[in-house]
């Protein structure tokens, strides 16, 4: 065999070996891409489920906040009613419409009698 034929055969064998390595690399890359796509799909599904759970939790928190605010407002109203009730000289209670001037007038009338 001539030197040219040997060299050509050697180059052809190298090309075939390179081609086989490239096929193996391509198969490996396809497996990696498939695994990445599956991972992405799982992450997307998990993300969607997490978002749904967060929405439920957020709705529950908003409900609790509204309930807590209603309770606080009710307690404040009760406290204000109790706080604004002032004893009259006769010992009765009235709401905040009973002013200091009325107390002074009542006290003066009681002292005169």
Image: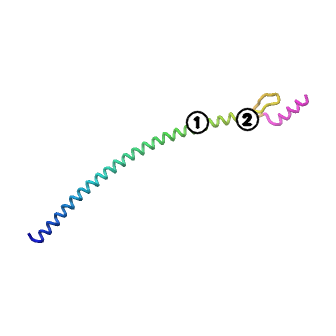
Asked whether, in this view, residue 52 is left or right of residue 97, the answer is left
Q: Secondary structure at mark 2?
A: helix
Residue 13 percent across, percent down from the top left: 16, 63
Q: Which residue is mark 1?
A: 67
Residue 87 percent across, percent down from the top left: 78, 31
Q: Quadrant of residue 25?
A: bottom left
Which residue corresponds to the image point at 51% horizontal and 39% vertical from the top-left?
59
Magenta residues span 98-113
Residue 61 percent across, percent down from the top left: 54, 40
Please name whichever residue, 14 or 91, is drawn nearer the observer in this view of the structure: 14
Vertical comparison of 59 with 91: above or below: below
Q: Residues within 10 Å of mark 2 (few under 14, many from 20)?
A: few
Q: Earlier in the sequence, mark 2 or mark 1?
A: 1
Which residue corresponds to the image point at 86% horizontal and 33% vertical from the top-left?
105
Quadrant where the N terminus is found in the figure: bottom left
Please name whichever residue, 9 or 81, is drawn nearer the observer in this view of the structure: 9
Which residue corresponds to the image point at 56% horizontal and 37% vertical from the top-left?
64
Q: Which residue is mark 2?
A: 83
Gap in angstroms between the C-alphas marked 2 and 1: 24 Å
Vertical comparison of 42 with 107: above or below: below
Asked whether, in this view, residue 70 is left or right of residue 37, the answer is right
């Amino acid at each position: 065999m001539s030197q040219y034929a040997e060299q050509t055969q050697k180059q052809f064998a190298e090309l075939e070996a390179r081609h086989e390595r490239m096929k193996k690399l391509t198969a490996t890359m396809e497996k990696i891409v498939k695994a990445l796509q599956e991972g992405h799909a799982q992450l997307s599904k998990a993300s969607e489920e997490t978002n749904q759970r967060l929405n439920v939790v957020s709705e529950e928190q908003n409900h609790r906040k509204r309930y807590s605010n209603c309770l606080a407002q009710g307690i404040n109203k009760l406290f204000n009613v109790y706080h604004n009730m002032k004893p009259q000289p006769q010992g009765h209670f009235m709401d905040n419409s009973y002013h200091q001037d009325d107390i002074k007038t009542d006290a003066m009338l009681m002292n005169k009698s």
